[in-house]
Amino acid sequence: MPMYQPSGRRREADTELGLGGGGQVLDVETAVKDGILGGGGGGGGLISEGGMTEKLDLKEIVEELENIEVPSVFICPISLEPMRDPVTLCTGQTYERSNILKWFSLGHITCPTTMQELWDDSITPNNTLHQLIYSWFSQKYLAMKKRSEDVQGRALELLDTLKKVKGQARVRALKDLRQVVALNSAKNTVEENGGVALISSLLGPFTSHAVGSEALGILVNLDLDAESRRNLVQPAKISLMVDMLNEGSTDTKINCTRLIETLLNGDVCGADTVSSLSLLVGLLRLIKEKKHQNGVLAGLRLLKALCSQEPVRNSLVSIGAIPQLIEILPNFDPECLEIALHILDSLSSLSEGRVALKDCPNTIPNLVKLLMRISESCTQLALSILWAVCKLAPEECASQAVEAGLAAKLLLVIQSGCNPVLKQRSAELLKLCSLNYTATHFISKCKLTRTIQ
């Protein structure tokens, strides 16, 4: 049975309330009278709206404030959840009514905390503690509601300011609004009061990078409707985003990438609308920044989306994307690795892409290492790329693949529980690799002992 132990966060809340470190209330009635509750002048759990006064529901308040630090004395030792109807046993221990009644219904005749046998099985409502809990939660709820209203008011104020100011004053207003939008309570306010259109209107051919960076930092956190998306795919705005992707800070580059991906996911534009050599070069630079994993993931996701168009794939091959991706494959985490393999697989559909893969010395060794190591999806993609390369130049590539340990890996795939399509492709590739060897020589090249180890 779980027994409550106050955590560090609970102890902080206990201190705020004036409780001892052991989680026990010292003279609760005095606490109420002395205003530790803030009962006098704090509204006493009443909320006024439209001239009407309404009493707050404790259950709803507790659910609304589920992530708040709660004093340990409010916690039921049985459920480890805040009490809403506290009752006290003859041992002096207090529990949530429903929890202690369930304890009794299971046939227990002891106090759950002390394990003392009860000489009296009656339960007494702890009205003083109930008042303490109710008042404390009411105060926290009303304070949260007021902060939320203040944030929404601040958002409206900043939107109004943005209509009037320019230069550094505009940058400051955007910085402040960006911080406000980071709070979920302000997002709807900005969206419902024309904030998206206003901020989008600040982006254009003569927008400074300081203004553009802050504006994009806001837009990526807002929900964009179809009209907003159409507005943002104007050539001048896309050009500004691409410029900032190549020249901005890492944070700005990531925001540009995410915003362009958001625009692609809608029905208002295709990859051909936003893609350019400058965009592709900027994305490759972002992907190679090892220190910023969020940037690597964002860049790869956008590249994958852009690869749906053949002209984009041709451009990627022409700017040397294949050797760059092959070289950094070993540095990717599983999520990034699968996306990178998707991109390389799509590039292998082009004759120029297959040649570029064959000419890169690390293509085969890096791909062979991935087989049966990350996931079935990664294995399937790696096999697809290896097949494209080996099919292009069987004599040259097949022998290189066998030397890299491909044959042994393929045998493992065939004997594993992978899907039949994957096994069939492995068998075909294994047959292709064996053409340049005698049976005995090929078996010796399989290196099965090393692979099993």
Image (cartoon, rainbow, N blue to C red):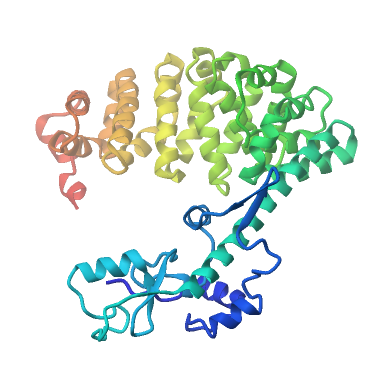
- Of 350 and 30, which appears nearest the observer? 30
Q: Is residue 383 left or right of residue 86?
A: left
Q: Is residue 245 visible?
A: no
- Which picture quadrant has residue 347? top left
- Could you tell me which quadrant the N terminus lies in? bottom left
Name the residue located 70 percent from the left edge and 28 percent from the top edge.
196
Name the residue located 51 percent from the left edge and 54 percent from the top edge.
57
Q: Is residue 158 left or right of residue 417?
A: right
Residue furthest out toward the left: 440
Q: Is residue 214 left or right of residue 268?
A: right
Instruction: Report the number of discs.
Output: 0
- Which picture quadrant has residue 320? top right
Residue 115, image x, y percentages: 26, 83
Q: Is residue 30 above or below residue 254?
A: below
Q: Is residue 377 above or below residue 41?
A: above
Q: Is residue 284 visible?
A: yes
Residue 277, image x, y percentages: 63, 21
Residue 174, image x, y percentages: 78, 39
- Of 161 and 219, which appears nearest the observer? 161
- Of 216 and 321, which appears nearest the observer? 216
Residue 366, image x, y percentages: 37, 39
Name the residue located 64 percent from the left edge and 69 percent from the top edge.
39
